[in-house]
Image (cartoon, rainbow, N blue to C red):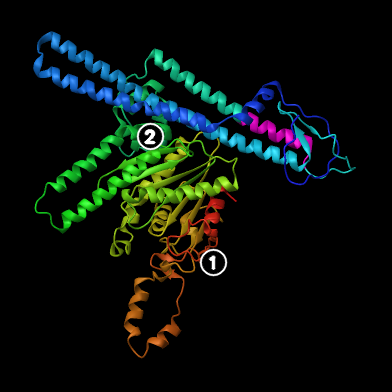
Amino acid sequence: MTRRPGPPAARYVASPVATPDASQVVGYAQLWSADPGAWAAAGAAWRGSTGPVRHRADALDARVAGLRPAWSGAAGDAARERVTAQRTELTGVLPALIEVEQVLAEFAARLRGAKARLAAAVALADQGRLLIDRSGRVRADPAVPRPAERVGPGVAQVAAAVHQAVALAGAADREATARLAGLSAAAGAGWVSIPPVGRPPTGAGPGEVGRWWAGLTPAERRWLVAHEPALVGRLDGVPVTARDQANRLLLAARRAALLARERGLLSRAPRGPLEVAGLARVAAALRGLDALAERLAASGPPRAYLLGLDPAGDGRAIVALGNPDRAGAVLTYVPGMTADLADAPGELGRATRVLDRCAALAPAEETAAVLWLDYDAPDFLHEAAWGGQARDAGPALHRFQEGLRASHEGPPARHTVLGHSYGSVVVGTAARDHGLSADALVFVGSPGVGVEHAAELRMPAGQVWASTAPDDVIRLARPPDELARRAVFGATPLGPAAALLHPPGHELWFGHDPSDPGFGGRRFPSGRYGHTGYWEAGNPALDGMARVVLGG
């Protein structure tokens, strides 16, 4: 029997001993000593095998190319066919290796949640001056006096908390075991099989895509990931795990495309200002891509899922921290002006801070955060002054949110979409014009969201939130007609009178300030951290964002 230290004990009366069932007697001890990090590291080792496998596949490609001019006839054809078949077998393993890592990483994440629940149960026992033995049994401490009235949690309450924690770990263990058993069976039966002819038509909704995917066998899905990764990786409605596998397989090709663009610019001589600027952008995009790749390779929590990557133009990326298909609360973060592939690691850091705060507030809850940078953000102020790029982004954001709903497993998650700066214009415009499959919208540092009142965003009552720092320069983003009026009258004797007749209001460049009470939404505070400091550790806005994500 072990007594665990805790806060000053509350009083209690004696209660019967609560004993977990036989499966929990072992489970409690296992959960107490379990190391989620070891499971995640084991998964990373499996994923690391993709490098040697791909290297070997490339060597077989070179072998086939070498045979073609040197060996003709039936024997040469047969040799090339055999080597090509070996390469196909190798590439068929690649999705499975990533899948093993996903299974182990997700098991580790659920194990962390179960351990957090168990720690809370132990703290509850300390509060009630109760004992938990190594088998998970809970009972009153005979050494503590027994007043007539109990104060604090009782045996049954603590036993129920222990049971829930162990049950969560047991469910995670059974699920991971079943998924690994399926992969083991596939190793003997064949990793891949060719799927039926037919793919979702262009414009198919996420629901239709999800039904198509559900109708395939696991082997057919792995074939598609291995042979059509560009299709699978971009389809909203396909599960997050499959999109991640496909996009990770495309990473090397995406980097090669950037390098080819860089070589093309370097080959131009003489290089003018446009070429120099282009080289700088490509170099920054390469640094951003490499930083993303480093984060994708990390085994530490939360696991990153690559849901989209396009190096064209300024570059785009969709990256999830934690699995949105499994989480009970999901944040989609849309960044603002100048955001591109080069900025993706920094923007992902903002999503990470919200997720970390969620974990601090609710350590037992499974949450996920998505950086959605799948639009052409304005690069210059004159571009940001108009809403065209926000309107262009609307259909894609609408479809992405619909896809998260379609592929989610278990009970519906709470979905929150957060827009910063011009990203709030994107979110507001998408909600206004197309609707967003979300339970809450959050706007921080917003120049307006394209509507005059929260009701126009088609969201549940009380689920439109906003915050603007007192020193955020976005407050100066006044409508064009107001700026013109000030410019006309400001240099005349009528200027002071005009200012008195038309004091600064709550109209911003893109509509009514969403952080003004008159907008009809709800507000949370921000400290004086400027336009980009909403994610700083000392800013109450960070806590506000996390609480909205959690539904608090």
Task: Residue 158: name its quadrant.
Answer: top right
Q: Are the residues flagged by discs 2 and 1 in contact, CB closer than 8 Å?
A: no
Q: How far is mark 2 from mark 1, CA to CA?
A: 41 Å
Task: Residue 228: name its quadrant.
Answer: top left
Name the secondary structure under disc 1: helix
The reply to whether residue 214 is visible in this rendering is: no
Q: Amino acid at mark 2?
A: Arg
The reply to whether residue 425 is visible in this rendering is: yes
Instruction: Please name the residue that numbered disc 1 is placed on.
Output: 517
Q: Is residue 72 left or right of residue 516?
A: left
Q: Residue at x 59, y 27 (%)?
A: 171
Return the x and y of residue 531 as percentages of the image width and height: 43, 63
Q: Amino acid at mark 1?
A: Pro
| Crowd around label 2: few <14 · some 14–19 · many ≥20 (10 Å) | many
Q: Residue at x 44, y 26 (%)?
A: 100
Mark 2 or mark 1: whose residue is earlier in sequence: 2
Return the x and y of residue 257 as percentages of the image width and height: 23, 40
Magenta stretch holds residue 157: yes
Is residue 248 depicted above or below 291 in this figure?
A: above
Return the x and y of residue 390 as percentages of the image width and height: 35, 56
Quadrant that contains the N terminus: top right
191 vs 277, nearest the viewer = 277
Return the x and y of residue 497 as percentages of the image width and height: 42, 88
Q: Residue at x 37, y 89 (%)?
A: 494
Please give the range of residues in magenta.
Answer: 153-168
Magenta stretch holds residue 429: no
Instruction: Please name the residue that numbered disc 2 is placed on.
Output: 243
94 vs 126, nearest the viewer = 126
| Crowd around label 1: few <14 · some 14–19 · many ≥20 (10 Å) | few
- Is the magenta region chiefly helix, strand or loop? helix
- Foreground mark, 2 or 1, reads 2
Is residue 301 depicted above or below 43 in this figure?
A: below
